[in-house]
Image: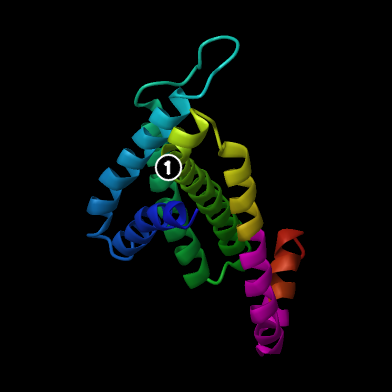
Amino acid sequence: MLVANVVSTIPGALIGAFTASLSGVIFAVPLVFVLGRVVQRQLSLLPQPGPRRWISGGADALAFLAFFILSVVLFELAGSALAAGSFVYYWIFKFILVAMAAGTGIFISAVLEECVIARLSRRAHGNVSYYTPVLRANYLTLAIVLLVAALEMLPRRLNAPNFIASWLQSLSAMFGFT
């Protein structure tokens, strides 16, 4: 499992490093496309009862690429909304961005981890799918990390001088009171 976690962390760290600058996005796009192809290939190995999948070939890779581009656009929109002082739009864009990034990150991580675990255990256990326990472990880890981060950040946010004022302003704007 440790090897699988290391293997799945490397692409995420590279994509994060590449997208830190606009010129780095040029390197991130092919990596995201390749990860989409890996996901497509791994999912195609699963037995599928019923009709043929409606998405196949490079469509999975293109979907990952579209999610990546959309997340970059949402990041820029959130930054623009924050610069303009529109906290409601900032938090809406940021929530969608974080949900998309976490969801696709967990999915890609689970596929890469499952691929490594399945290959390492194939000799002893045959061709077995480990998607359910790997996804469960990834979601549990995300929940724990988010809880720890929230517990660490909440006291500082509550003590910030404009936190409550900006929160109330955002809440009132959301309901149309401003």
Q: Secondary structure at mark 1?
A: helix
Which quadrant of the figure has residue 13? bottom left
Q: Is residue 95 left or right of residue 175?
A: left
Residue 178 appears anywhere in the view: no
**Residue 119 spot, x, y in % from top left:** 41, 38
Question: Quarter holding the C terminus?
Answer: bottom right
In the picture shown, does residue 126 fall above or below 36? above
**Residue 77 spot, x, y in % from top left:** 46, 58
Q: Which segment is the magenta one?
A: 143-166
Which residue is rendered at x = 49% and y = 50% of the image?
Answer: 105
Which residue is rendered at x = 22% and y = 60% of the image?
Answer: 23
Foreground pick, 23 / 103: 103
**Residue 68 spot, x, y in % from top left:** 40, 47
Dominant secondary structure of the residues highlighted in magenta in the image: helix
Question: Callout 1, which amino acid?
Answer: Leu
Q: Is residue 159 magenta?
A: yes
Q: Residues within 10 Å of mark 1 (few under 14, many from 20)?
A: some
Q: Which residue is mark 1?
A: 120
Which residue is rendered at x = 45% and y = 34% of the image?
Answer: 122
**Residue 104 spot, x, y in % from top left:** 50, 46
Foreground pick, 167 / 142: 142
Foreground pick, 136 / 66: 136
